[in-house]
Image (cartoon, grey):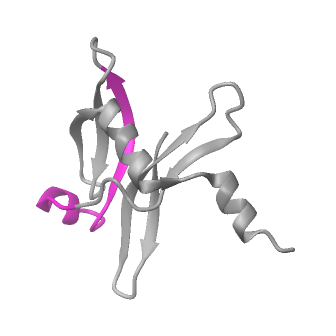
Amino acid sequence: MIYHGVRRTPSSSIYRLGLALFDLEQPDICLSRGDSWMFAPEADYERQGDVQDVVFPCGYTIGADGDTIRLYYGAADSCIALATGSIRELLEWLDENGHSEQAHDRRHRPT
């Protein structure tokens, strides 16, 4: 799942995209969630517009090869943009930069 979240700073807010993987049979179980953001405002059209420093997912399509993802996203609340990537590479990124929600919950549960 590609989702967006906001980080509030003293000067403004930054909207960025995160990545999480859920169990197909039990979608209420998060298998892994990225420890950092995978996509953040960088280009001028993402940083300057009606609302500064904003990217948010609007939808995606998967190519005929089953690996190419085309992510349509809002930028600075002023336009829609397109990012293209690889599902395989997103999953590799999640393996390297993610954690299991269950392991995280067990570590942070009061005893």
Residue 57 appears left or right of 76: right
Quadrant containing the C terminus is bottom right
Residue at 72% of width from left, 70% of height from top?
108
Residue 27 appears left or right of 40: right
**Residue lying furthest right in this view?**
111
Snapshot quadrant of residue 59: top left
**Residue lying furthest top in this view?**
64
Q: Residue 20 location, x and y as percent?
A: 51, 45
Please determine whether, in this image, residue 100 is positioned above or below residue 51. Answer: above
Residue 36 appears left or right of 48: right
Give the magenta range.
42-62
**Residue lying furthest bottom in this view?**
10
Residue at 31% of width from left, 23% of height from top?
67
Snapshot quadrant of residue 23: top right
Snapshot quadrant of residue 104: bottom right
Please determine whether, in this image, residue 10 is positioned above or below residue 27. Answer: below
Q: Residue 110 location, x and y as percent?
A: 83, 74
Please determine whether, in this image, residue 37 is positioned above or below residue 86. Answer: below
Residue at 34% of width from left, 85% of height from top?
11
Whether 12 is among the magenta residues is no
Q: Residue 22 location, x and y as percent?
A: 59, 37
Q: Residue 29 location, x and y as percent?
A: 69, 41
Task: Return the residue nearer the eye: 41 or 106.
Answer: 106
Task: Return the residue nearer the eye: 52 or 8.
Answer: 8
Residue at 55% of width from left, 47% of height from top?
32
Whether 44 is among the magenta residues is yes
